[in-house]
Amino acid sequence: MNSYSEIFNEIVDIVHSDYAGYEEKQDWDEPEYYREEIKKLEGQQELTPQKFTEIVDDYLISFQDRHMYFNFEGSDNVKTITRGFRTRRYKDVLYVIETFEENRFPKGSKIVAIDDRTINQVIASNPSSLRGASAEREDWSHIINKSSFVTIENENGEHIKFGLKDYEPVSKKKEHTLEVINEGTLVITLPSFADVDSTLDFVKNQDAKIKKCTNLIIDVRNNNGGNGQAISTLVPYIFPSDEHPSTEGELREFNYTNRNSDLFIQLCQNFRKDIKDQETLDVLDFAEEQCKKYRGQGFVALDFSDSLKDKASKFEGTDFPKKVVVMTDVYCASAAEYFVEMSMSSSKVTVIGRSTMGVNDYSDLVIKKWADMFSLYYPISRRVQKTLNHPLHGKGIQPDRYIPWTPEHIYKDIDLLYALEILKEEVNI
């Protein structure tokens, strides 16, 4: 395997020439600082795969793009690690919203300090690391992963310190589910669009139930995206029979460098092995053709309006369900954001919750790997018209009805209760 310094130098080269945002974000980074740190630790033989990943994460934060990230995949000798829980801030307290491998404190626990610094002190010293426009949009994982202990306030107001542990991640299955709320209302939870065929098959298998229901609630609050083709069978249910998705395609520029073209072709070929859906295979064929056609030409603008118009001419919406509520949050990203954006153009749909993550200014990710141990995921396309950065909602897609996040969400599905209230008012369920 390449040395850590060689890998880092290649990462810098990628983000300075292949990354879709390299022109707009020129001089945002300071690679020399990290180069020196890596060289020093290499010379002292103190650089572990986890420490290297931490350094690269620090470096990539400079670009403020949550669609670009570096993963340590692990190896036979070295395992990946996790802290085993997720957090979210409300005012000056960091709440544990989910626990996985960590079992010493439950969800709902209040973290009031990290490494003997109050939450507000941590924010003041690490504002860019949180990458959030507001408290409910912050990502605390980077800080938690680098910290040694947290202070938790119990029900009696006592402060208890817990040393943070490294856990080997337990596989978490993301399965689509359908729940019957009552005779006329269904809730579909879609946690990922990564597996196209399984998503398409799931929706097709529920077709009869969906077409009989009056109200459909679609939960994509924790859907971090995947392949946009996965939503194709779902879209007809969210439009009435006399409407169709917008045919105004956004203008995107693809950075067809030699490396990006080769990596994208490789990605398409890998996807093709596990996909049966013909429409998805056709999209992969088209993507490969463009990579071969424009390889080495840098940024090329592509307009998908003709393709959208062709699809719209064949599109058929449905009379049932009559009303659709889409629940979203900051953890809704990438392809799931496109679904939310499309949903908002339908007269059937009300989007509720909190703004999506807002990562699609730079999209179409490729993966550069090093010895199956490290992987850099980065986008190669950019929107010509960038999203405005809202002080509360960031660059995310704002819902029709905004529901601020509070600690009550940890114990009760406030969004779902709100969705049911909307349906009760509008359709009289």
Image (cartoon, rainbow, N blue to C red):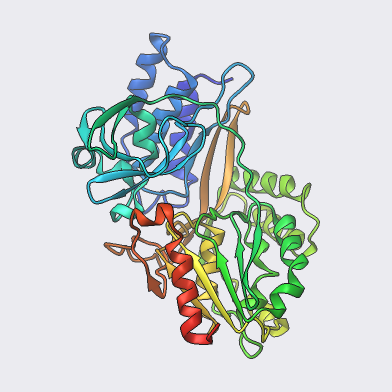
Q: In this view, does 336 lie above or below 237?
A: above
Q: Which residue is drawn at 59% across and 27% down?
A: 373
Q: Can residue 27 be seen at all in this image of the molecule?
A: no
Residue at the front extreme, as displayed: 156
| Between 87 and 428, the one nearer to me in the picture | 428
| Image quadrant in which you'd find residue 370 | top right
Q: Can residue 327 be seen at all in this image of the molecule?
A: yes
Residue at the bottom extreme, as displayed: 242
Residue 385 horizontal/vertical position (percent):
41, 68
Q: Residue at x 61, y 22 (%)?
A: 75
Q: Is residue 310 above or below residue 95?
A: below
Task: Please count the marks in the image.
Answer: 0
| Image quadrant in which you'd find residue 285 | bottom right
Residue at the top extreme, as displayed: 44
Residue 71 horizontal/vertical position (percent):
52, 34
| Between 366 and 289, the one nearer to me in the picture | 366
Of the 4 image quadrants, the one containing the C terminus is: bottom right
Residue 171 horizontal/vertical position (percent):
62, 36
**In the image, is 291 to the left or to the right of 48?**
right
Q: Is residue 406 above or below residue 59?
A: below
Of the 4 image quadrants, the one containing the N terminus is: top right
**In the image, is 288 to the left or to the right of 83?**
right
Q: Which residue is drawn at 47% across and 52% down?
A: 20
Residue 115 horizontal/vertical position (percent):
26, 27
